[in-house]
Image (cartoon, rainbow, N blue to C red):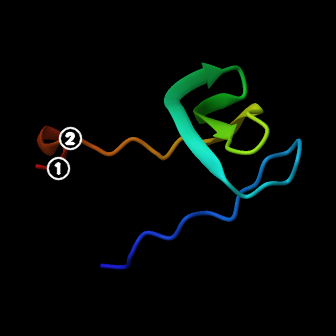
Amino acid sequence: MTPFERPDRCCPKCSHKGYMFRARKSVEVPEGKFVETKYRCRSCSHEWRERIPAPPESKGAEDAA
């Protein structure tokens, strides 16, 4: 198992690399399903969101048989 590596991310306002995770939720928009993550900068308190495509849904145990 590989250790967790923190993504190289920084505040879009002040470019500070320190940030706090605030929230994560799944969103469905006309373009598709996304996972939206909210962050707050530790330096200037700016909050921003990032959206990435949602991972494909895994099939349940009953579909595997």
Q: Quadrant of residue 18?
A: bottom right
Tell me the residue at 17%/49% (across/down). Answer: 64
Q: Which quadrant is the N terminus positioned in?
A: bottom left
C-alpha gap between disc 2 and disc 1: 7 Å
Is 54 positioned to the left or the right of 3 in the image? right
Q: Nearer the viewer, residue 40 or 9?
A: 40
Residue 12 point in image, percent of width and height: 85, 45
Q: Give the mark toward the camera: 2 or 1.
A: 2
Q: Nearer the viewer, residue 41 or 53?
A: 41
Name the residue type under label 1. Ala
Tell me the residue at 51%/70% (across/down). Answer: 5
Classify mark 2: helix, strand or loop: loop
Classify mark 1: helix, strand or loop: helix
Q: Is residue 41 above or below residue 10?
A: above
- State the residue position of label 2: 60
- State the residue position of label 1: 64
Asked whether the beta carbons under mark 2 and mark 1 sit within 8 Å of each other, the answer is yes
Residue 9 point in image, percent of width and height: 71, 57
**The furthest residue to the bottom:** 2
**CA neighbours of label 1 inside 10 A, class few (<14), some (14 to 19), many (20+):** few
Tell me the residue at 20%/40% (across/down). Answer: 60
Residue 37 point in image, percent of width and height: 59, 36
